Structures are given as C-alpha cells and as structure tokens.
Amino acid sequence: MYDRAKTTQIGVEIAYVYALALAFALIIVSALVERRADTQYKALLLNQLQLGENMKFIMPFNIISWIKCDAILAQMKGNRPHWLALFSLVCFSGYSLAATDNTTQPTRKILTQNGVILLYHHVSNHTPKSTSISPDMFKQHMVYLKQHHTVLPLAKVVDAIQSKTPLPANTVVITFDDGYENILKNAHPIMVDMGFPYTIFINPGEIGTNRSQLTWAQVEAMHNDGVTFANHTLDHLHMLDGRVSYNGADSGTNDEAWLNKVWQNVAEAEAIIDSKIGESLKYLAYPFGEFNQNLADKLAQEGYIAFGQHSGAVGPHSNFQALPRFPAAGPYANLTTLKTKLNSIAMPVLSTSFEGEHIPEVNRDTVQGSSDESRVPPITLTIKGDDVRLSQVNCFFSGSVVETNVEGNAVTFSITQALPVGRSRVNCTAPSNSQSGRYYWYSQPFFVADKNGNYPD
C-alpha cells in the first residue's frame, strides 16, 4: 500500500542530505575565497570604472549594484560568516559580467607623467633610406599604436608634463620633420583613418618652392583637417655652423654674431607660419637635432619649447629646450625594437656634470683626432627616485657598452674613444622596479664640427 507520509519523509531526508552537501561545498568554496574577496571586489570595481572605452554598459544598473553590494557587505562584516565571502564574490562577479560588452576588455588605464615622441621624415619607397619608412611599414606602426597606445596631440602632452598633469599610460606623440609632400600622399590618409593627431615641423622658406615639399595650399588644407605645423627654421640650416672660428677656438664676437643669425632665422620662420595658418605654437625642432646651451637658453627666454633628435621618453625632468624624440624610420623602423622604445620611461635626471654654454657641442683641433678636445671627460648623472634599478644600468656608444660606475643615485659613464665629426650620442637604460619589462631611458647627444667649424648632413 502506498504510504504518502513515509514517502514524503524520505523525500525530505534526501533533500536534506543534498542541502547539507551543497552547504558543505559552499563553505569550502567560500573559505577559499573569503580572504581575497574583500580586497578583490573593490579592485575589480575600480578597474571597471577606470576603463574609458568600456563605459558603454548601463550605468544606473551597475552603480546601483555597486552601492547595494557595498552596503550589504558593510552590514555583514560584523559576524563575517563564510557565506559573506561567497555573497561578495557572486555580487561583484555579477557586476563585472554586466559591465562587459562583447568586445575584448582593455587593460586598466594607469595615469602617469610620461610620454614618447616619435620622429618620421619621409613616408615613401623612393626617398633616402636613412630617413624613410615605406607606406606599408608606416601603416603597421600606426595599427600597433592603435591597439596598444594612446596617441595624443603634441601640445597636450607638453602642457600636461609641464603642469604635472597625469597622462594615460603608454602615451605617444607622432611628429614629422620637413614638410614633404609624401607625408600628405602616403601618411595623412592613414592618420585620418586612425583618428590620430600629429605635428609636422616645416621650413617656411622651402614650402611651395621645392617640388618635394608641400605647398601652402596643402598646408592650410591639412591644418583644417587638424594637423598642427611648427617651426623647423626658415631653411633647414645647420644651426651650429660657423659658431667656432676656423682655427677651432671660440670667439666672443663670433659667438654673438652666430646666435643673432640663428635666432633671426627662427623668428622669421615663426612669423611666416603664423601669417599663413594663424597659429604660432613656438615649438622648434632643431634641424639635424643640433643645438647648444646658448641657443637653448635664448629659446627659453623667447618662450619656445624645442625638440632634438636624440632618443628617449619625455617626463617632468626633461629639458624642455631639448626634448628627445625616437627616430622611427630608416634603420629604426623595425617594429620589434620600436616596441621597447614605445614602452620606455623618461630617466629622472636631476643634474648632469656635462655643463657649459656650448654643451653638447664639443670642439676639436683642426687635425681630426689629434687633440684631446675631441674627447669628453667622464659624465655623471644624478638620478631621482627608487624605481630606477641602477644596479642594472647600461650605457652604449657607437654600438658598444660604455664603462659605468654607480654610487648611490649617481651614474658615471666614460667614453674612451674620440668623438667623430658630426652627431653621436650615448644612450643609458635601466629597468623599472615596479613596471616589469619597461626601461628608463636617457640620451646624451654630442656635436663635433669639422676643421672649418661646420657640420655634415
């Protein structure tokens, strides 16, 4: 005979056993996650809230969910049962799922006071290889930047670093030197498609007069498209030419005449740019990257920011009359090596022993290589901060490792060979303690004139 009461009792007992098993499993799981839940859930929330591109989820639902979960957890923390951790995990996992769209989650945007400026010249298959990048390779660069970096206008990055305003991590700026028409033909469409801002440093005396250069009509049209134009001197002169007299010695009169000549060139170029496009940024890119301290001081007095061609990232301790830029064309176009540079951090150099009114210009005797003047003494950099792993600092010159010595926060490097005529530099790098795979970077350029006081292209 069917006994309803007994059957019901058996069902209850089975349900009870299942409930106990489930409860036991929940206790084990919750015990494992309890100690991590309280710290992880807020980290998860902050991560979600800082994802600028991922704010497309429904804000009211998720903000309310956050508030409710936080309030309930606050009430529960007194007794702290195991199921509190489970509730925390479920509650905020639900938030995380709700906050995720169908796209891949971007990484959290860390704010920093650091940026990398890239330097290009030609974008063409038919121009000098040393300063050119093919259109295909240039597009590969831009696609990589789109996927992994934040490209910002030059002025925004300069202003942010000067005012110590945080920037997105992996900030990059794109610049071109010389107003070549192939920039408009081969690079501009890619930049527009990517939505990237960029700056071209032009020589106003060459615009519209040289067949390889842009015309003023093209400059104005590109400016209307959002491209910024800045000063590269009137006619791309070697700015240090003639400063040293023909016997290799400095002359006060010659030095004064030289500085007046190059300053008038810069001022005239700036006036033309302003008259043509109605914008004067007072940014100067040194032709060939050549400058000295006298020129840098004059530009500072006139309110200019200046850019070199030595490598490195830019940060609060950078020299704003000689900001570094990474060349990204010619032998430097390889994307594999460029990735390391794009992730570099500006070395926080507080001071350097390499000082003087003509530094980093280095004089030499009229007979090349016969004088110790072509050599430089050991140079000491004083570094700020504990994040630079100075125990692993390395300096390089002409492809070789340079002898270095570290004492406290001071790094001294010594170049034993004579400097060549023209341009050369020492690059120093050191790993970051807090950011795995990233390196602090510092570059010291040197400029050596020939026996006539001039500089080669």
Image: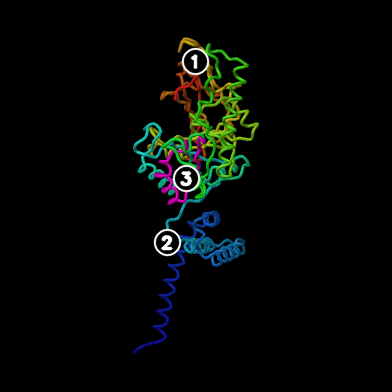
Residue range in magenta is 176-204
Q: Which mark is residue 323?
A: none
Question: Crowding at label 3, few (<14), some or many (≥20) Cα neighbours within 10 Å?
Answer: some
Q: Which mark is residue 218?
A: 3
Question: Crowding at label 2, few (<14), some or many (≥20) Cα neighbours within 10 Å?
Answer: few
Quadrant holding the C terminus: top left
Q: Which mark is residue 452?
A: 1
Q: Nearer the viewer, residue 63 or 138?
A: 138
Q: Secondary structure at mark 1?
A: loop
Q: Which residue is mark 2?
A: 102
Q: Report the amino acid beneath label 2.
A: Asn
Nearer-N-terminus badge (3/2): 2
Question: Crowding at label 1, few (<14), some or many (≥20) Cα neighbours within 10 Å?
Answer: some
**Magenta highlight on residue 198:** yes
Q: Nearer the viewer, residue 252 or 442?
A: 252
Q: Is residue 150 visible?
A: no
Quadrant holding the N terminus: bottom left
Position in image of residue 315 (x %, y %): 56, 37
